[in-house]
Amino acid sequence: MSNTSSRLADARARIDELDEQIIAILAERMSVCASIAETKSDEGIPMMQPNRVDEVRERYVALGTERGLSQEFAKAVHACITREACRLEDEILGNTPKSQIIAIDHVAVAVPDLEAAVTELVEKYGMTVIERRSVDGKHSGMTSATLRANQATFVVCQGTSPASNVSQYVANRGPGIQHVALSVADHEAHQADLRKAGAELLTGIIHAPGLDQSFTRRSSTTGLQLEFVSRSEEHTGFEDDSVRELFESMERENVW
Ligand SMILES: [Fe+2]
C-alpha cells in the first residue's frame, strides 16, 4: 500500500470510529430527552419551552464557533436533534404530532385598483404603507403594496395586464383574499408533514436571505391558497426574487 492510500485508509478508519461515537452520543442524548419527557409527564410540565430551545441553539452556535464550525451547520445540527427530541417526547406523551403553524404572517389581497384599495385601508382602517413593489414575470406582472397596522400585515396586489394571475383571480372571483401566509417553526419538517398528508404543493421552499417561503395550490374545498413563511428575527419584509419565483410558478402552471 502506498503512503497516500495508507493515510487515506487511516483517515477513513478514524471517521468510522468518530461516527460510532457520534451515534452513541446521540443515542445517549435521546435517552436523556426521553427521561425528561417522562418527568414532564409525571409533573404535568408543558413540553415546549421555547426559551430553553433558544438557549440551547445559542449554545450550539457558540460551541461550534469555538471549534471552527459554521453557524449554519451548528444551527442545522441543533434543529435536527431538536426535531427528533420533540418527536420522541410526543411518542412518550402519546401526543399527536404538533402543527408547525405559529401565526398569520400576512394576508395577500387581489384587487382591480391598487390605489383605491390602499386609500381605503389607510384612510378607513389606519394602516400604514410600508413597502411598494413591482414584479414582472415571463408574460405579465403585478404591482403591490404592503400595509401594516401593529401585528396585522396585508399585501395588496393588482395585475399589470389581463394575463396576470392576479388579474385572473379578480376576473374569476372578484377582489378578495389571494392567499393567506402562515408562519411556521420548522419549514423543512413542515414540508415533510404536508407531503405525508397529501397536501397539494405548488412550490418547494423558496429560499432567500433570512426568508423561506412555500406555497400550496388553491384548495377547491376551502378556496384557500396557503403560503408558509419562516423568517430570521431581523427579516420582516419580502424579497424581490422570491416574489418573482412564486409569480412565475403560478404563470408556468397557469393557476391564479
Ligand atoms: Fe405572500
Image (tube, rainbow, N blue to C red):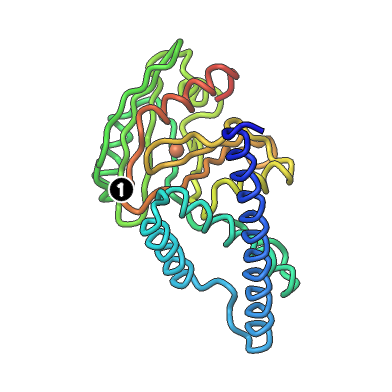
Of residue 237 and residue 217, the one placed in the foreground of this image is 237
Q: Which residue is mark 1?
A: 148
Q: Quadrant of residue 216?
A: top right
Residue 74 spot, x, y in % from top left = 46, 54
Q: Is residue 250 left or right of residue 29?
A: left
Residue at the extreme bottom of the image, as rendered: 43
Q: How many marks?
A: 1
For the point 55% across and 25% down, the residue is: 256
- Does residue 70 sit above or below 120 in this rendering? below
Residue 152 spot, x, y in % from top left = 37, 52
Q: Quadrant of residue 12?
A: top right
Q: Quadrant of residue 7?
A: top right
For the point 45% across and 12% down, the residue is: 138
For the point 35% across and 56% down, the residue is: 151
Judge the density around disc 1: few (<14), some (14-19), many (≥20) Cα neighbours within 10 Å. some
Residue 238 spot, x, y in % from top left = 35, 38
Q: Is residue 249 left or right of residue 140?
A: right
Assign ligand 1 to one image quadrant.
Answer: top left
Ligand 1: does it lie within 8 Å of the C-beta at label 1?
no
Q: Quadrant of the N terminus?
A: top right
Of residue 141 and residue 65, the one placed in the foreground of this image is 65
Residue 119 spot, x, y in % from top left = 26, 37
The disc labelled 1 sits on which kind of residue?
Arg
- Is residue 217 something one can see in this rendering? no
For the point 62% across and 38% down, the residue is: 6
- Does residue 254 sit above or below 192 in this rendering? above
SS for tag 1?
A: strand
- Is residue 70 something one can see in this rendering? yes
